[in-house]
Amino acid sequence: MAAHCCLGQEAPIPQADSANLMGLTTPITVSFSDGRVVNGSGFFYFEYGPDDSKAQGPHWRAIARIYVVTAKHLIQPTRLRDLTTFTFAIRVGKQDHVDWHRLELSGAELGKRLHVCQKDTVDVAVVEVTDLENQEIKKLLEERIQVMNISGATLDQLPNKSPLEVQPGDDVIVIGYPMGLYDQFNKLPVLKKGMLSTPVGLHFDGLDAFLLDFKYYEGSSGSLIISKPTHVGLGKNNEQLWSTNRQYVFLGVYEGETYLNGDQAQLADLGLGWYSYNIEEAIKNQPVVH
């Protein structure tokens, strides 16, 4: 089950759908000392605390860690000294509309929270924001400001954990902010459909990545890639399972359209998605600055 929380009073917009897709993502803005500003997409990733082994069916679990995940090339970790601010956002209700509430980290602070994979080719950046987000939400609630639905992808939704199967040719959903577009009134992301082009688990071109048929737009880098949500799955003995909430497989992190075919960069409305397990691999490593 996707982890999520909804904080505050009555929302000025309808509740999120049962897969909780609308609260998963955040726009990312990275500013550099030379005046460059890079915009992209990101999403929240939750680590659960210990589960109650006696609990049956849907139940509450503590969220032990909160991370923001995005594409590493937006941050350029080797140039952290040139990075001035890293910004992500949560949504807050303001009377009859929703606003972005932006949270900001300096380059120095980002380095202490930034986790990346040992393989330099993996275009995944994981930023721990547990204390920052919890403090900010507490402050907002004390000010009687409504904090909108927050969701997070989790380890339970990785392909080897989920009862759902994903095959080449299946629809995938890429959730982010292409060209900086989003629902201006409700501050909701754009969901775009693509198609999985390679088998899940196959290392496309020897990378920890898969290929998808999906047209790139600037700002999409760092988007969340999931399978098409469904109520139906298969159990260990191929028995049919039904979930009251729509479930999906968390496939990975979208990098962009360009990939290498031999020594040549190719553009063919195809893109790379870095497998979701790279997030856990990155978290295991020390922060870039420690």
Image: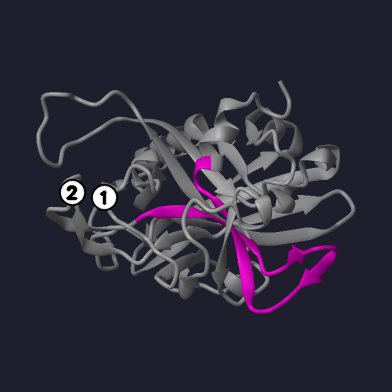
Q: Is residue 185 shown above or below 162?
A: below
Q: Is residue 11 magenta?
A: no
The numbered dot on residue 42 is none
Which mark sits nearer the N-terminus, 2 or 1?
Answer: 1
Q: Does the image show residue 216?
A: no
The amino acid type, in three-letter code, at marker 2 is: Gly
From the image, tell me which residue sits under label 2.
235
Q: Look at the numbered discs 2 and 1 and tell me whether their residues touch, using CB distance below 8 Å.
A: yes
Which stretch is magenta? 249-277
The amino acid type, in three-letter code, at marker 1 is: Pro
Q: Position of residue 214 (x, y in %)?
A: 56, 74
From the image, tell me which residue sits under label 1.
163
Q: Is residue 276 magenta?
A: yes
Residue in view at x 49 percent, y 66 percent: 174
Q: Is residue 88 shown above or below 259?
A: above
The image quarter containing residue 22 is: bottom left
Q: Position of residue 63 (x, y in %)?
A: 35, 32
The image quarter containing residue 79 is: top right
| Label 2 CA crowd tier, 10 Å (few <14, some 14–19, many 20+) | few
- The figure's colour scheme reads one colour
Q: Position of residue 2 (x, y in %)?
A: 30, 48
Front-lying residue, 167 or 285: 167
Residue in view at x 82 percent, y 50 percent: 32
Distance (Cα) linking label 2 and label 1: 6 Å
Residue in view at x 28 percent, y 59 percent: 19
Give SS at disc 1: loop
Q: Horizontally, is 180 left or right of 238 in the view?
A: right
Residue in view at x 80 percent, y 63 percent: 262
Secondary structure mostly seen in the magenta stretch: strand
